[in-house]
Amino acid sequence: MEAGGAGEVDHLAGERATAQFDVDHMKVAWAGSRHAVDVADRMARLVASDPVFRKDNRTMLPRKELFKDTLRKAAHAWKRIVELRLTEEEANLLRLYVDQPGYVDLHWGMFVPAIKGQGTEEQQKKWLPLAYKFQIIGCYAQTELGHGSNVQGLETTATFDPKTDEFVMHSPTLTSSKWWPGGLGKASTHAVVYARLITEGKDYGIHGFIVQLRSLEDHSPLPGVTLGDIGGKFGSGAYNSMDNGVLRFDHVRIPRDQMLMRLSQVTKEGKYVHSNVPKQLLYGTMVFVRQTIVADASKALSRATCIAVRYSAMRKQFGPQTGGPETQVLNYKTQQSRLFPLLASAYAFRFVGEWLKWLYTDVTHKLEAKDFSTLQEAHACTAGLKAVTTSATADGIEECRKLCGGHGYLNSSGLPELFATYVPACTYEGDNVVLLLQVARILMKTVSQLASGKQPVGTMAYMGNVQYLMQCKCGVNTAEDWLSPAAIREVFEARALRMAVNCAQNINRAPSQEEGLYELSPDLLEVAVAHIQLIIVTKFIEKVEQDIPGEGVKEQLRNLCNVYALYLVHKHLGDFLSTGCMTARQGALANQQLGKLYAQLRPNAVALVDAFNYTDHYLGSVLGRYDGNVYPALYDEAWKDPLNDSPVPDGYREHLRPLLKQQLKLSRL
Ligand SMILES: CCCCCCCC/C=C\C/C=C/C(=O)SCCNC(=O)CCNC(=O)[C@H](O)C(C)(C)COP(=O)(O)OP(=O)(O)OC[C@H]1O[C@@H](n2cnc3c(N)ncnc32)[C@H](O)[C@@H]1OP(=O)(O)O
Ligand SMILES: Cc1cc2nc3c(=O)[nH]c(=O)nc-3n(C[C@H](O)[C@H](O)[C@H](O)COP(=O)(O)OP(=O)(O)OC[C@H]3O[C@@H](n4cnc5c(N)ncnc54)[C@H](O)[C@@H]3O)c2cc1C
């Protein structure tokens, strides 16, 4: 937990004393409200003080023990949720702070939302109470061995049999085996299974079905159902606590009313009826989860930067040529230029995640009123932001590991496990490249409609300003000019639009649209990234323009916003120059201003990560400890490794002793 107890020394007190803002108010800005800070605080402490939720030994547990430990934690968490009558908000936070991937994530995160989004009212009434009380455990079984990205290519079949009023679930090929669903391997009793609906001899494509997989008596797989775990995954601990599974059906029968029938129905005679709604609503659960993944990106990146900032403030290497104390590595300009953009990104992703949640809620309300006009905007924003934020976060965690030098490579730093747990976010819920290509296609469509005078809306509205943005010149003359939000916004808009228009023109020169999209797909990725970065920068600017209470809080957020934007200008300078949005001199001025911003950020760095309000338990890092007392913690942690259980290792008698004795004999010859 945080410092302040009797006898504890705050080794970072000097760093905290230099902060130029009110940390308590920054906690509110980060969490969203005073209420959010208080609830998070209570739940984090509840978890940290409970010995069942201990996790410092996690990377040393063999897989079977790790999985059992996950079941124990999930059951204990549920017991506490019920005993303490926690609200949904509190329960979600408690699960977050338990911090161990497991079947409950998919049960609450995908199974329940899939039934809510795609089930009829009657189906919801039947299944949701069972799920809410954990009388059934569910997962989301979409991906197969042969197809993940291409959902329309899935092979599992659900063939309607009007004689018995049932669907027959079948896995016709090896590649049709369901493969990857979390919670499927060992824990789930039920799944929402995506399969090709076949009725009256016709294939109507992919639909969702609720299928019972295991007995509710003894948990054994039901007849015709083959189930298992797909095997160990990257890293120690990490995502290995999750039972990602394989599932095969051999003509398994389910009642007709277990097809999720909100979007389309099959009558008892076998007639297929599609409600008058866009087919893409079938993908609604993925859109929901992509939105939550953006919020999670800021959590993961803020954890990594919290560890790296605190450790960098405490770690010293080298000193002035003239002698004297060694330098904190956080004072090296290179350390700042690698670390501070990541800290700024964590804040940027937090605020864009907040905005995306609002957008998602707004679109959901519109859909309920049968207004589908914002469906494309929701798809583009969730897909694009999921891709950009998860890729940057995965890269950022790895950079934080390097920023912590050798100690960052130790499991006790928390960073290897954080990376291994996080990195599949670039793949699950849509491979990032596949998602960015979706965004790019929508951008290309928008560009092609500009000529007809159709005004783009939402996050693409800026494209309507095409006449101006295609020819405008950046007005920056001094480094300080880069502090203008209008100047920043304009170059990001001009870069995104010009890249999109250039790409669209190149596609139009191809023999066909399809060939053009195929040949230019690497460029399309960059177009999508430029557009999504514009959204993140814009939402950060809008956040800073709001009324933000607390001494110095707004100033710090403005500084972080400028760091985020100018870091992107520096990193993608090629885009800005080649599209003619700015000159090389203006690029140099941006970099000059970035250096000044880093210097302003430096005295506030530790306080800015304190504002995340993470307990030592949640951080799970000897390097990121609140009190900065890193060396005794590192030293103590090493002795906990099972290899240190005895001074002479197992295997000495069989493999070391004979070798050493043989060397002794040889030397005597
Ligand atoms: C609250 C707690 C949350 C906890 C979360 C826990 C996380 C646990 C960790 C992991 C869980 C992981 C789960 C999974 O991975 S589940 C499996 C996820 N799988 C995917 O994401 C697959 C990705 N593929 C796709 O989404 C699609 O196949 C596709 C979009 C790539 C292609 O779809 P396709 O039907 O072939 O269509 P087109 O490309 O031709 O597009 C047609 C049309 O539809 C529009 N569109 C596509 N997708 C959507 C959408 N989701 N919403 C709205 N509209 C969509 C597209 O733009 C086209 O439009 P048009 O040009 O106007 O016709
Ligand atoms: C940890 C984890 C948890 C998961 N949990 C679940 C779950 O609970 N339920 C579930 O149903 N699924 C789950 N999945 C599966 C996940 O959704 C898929 O792995 C993901 O959608 C990617 O699909 P794929 O594996 O088919 O990749 P592929 O599509 O085979 O990707 C391979 C490569 O091909 C490239 N590629 C593919 N298509 C294109 C294209 N059109 N253009 C250019 N490049 C392309 C990709 O960029 C990638 O580089 C999980 C996966 C992981 C790793």
Image (cartoon, grey):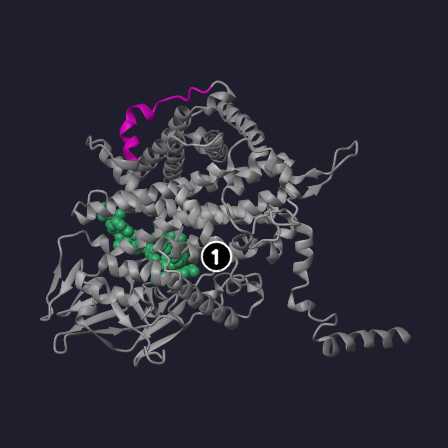
| Vertical relation: 92 (above or below) 72 | above
**Residue 94 shown left or right of residue 505 in the figure:** right
State which quadrant residue 493 falls in.
top left
Q: Which element is circle 1 on?
A: helix
Outermost residue on the right side: it is 668
Outermost residue on the left side: it is 269
Q: Does residue 31 appear anywhere in the picture?
A: yes
Q: Does residue 524 appear anywhere in the picture?
A: no
**Residue 246 shown left or right of residue 200 in the figure:** right
Q: Is residue 92 magenta?
A: no
Residue behind mark 1:
46
Question: Residue 383: x and y, percent?
Answer: 34, 47
Identified at 72% across, 79% down, the residue is 654
Question: Residue 204: x and y, percent?
Answer: 18, 63
Q: Is residue 465 magenta?
A: yes
Q: Amino acid at mark 1?
A: Leu
Per the rendered image, the range of residues in magenta is: 460-476
Q: Nearer the viewer, residue 618 or 464?
A: 618
**Residue 236 shown left or right of residue 256 in the figure:** right
Within 10 angstroms of label 1, few (less than 14), some, or many (20 or more) residues?
some
| Vertical relation: 656 (above or below) 103 | below
Question: Residue 461: x and y, percent?
Answer: 28, 33
| Vertical relation: 330 (above or below) 630 | above
| Vertical relation: 416 (above or below) 145 | above
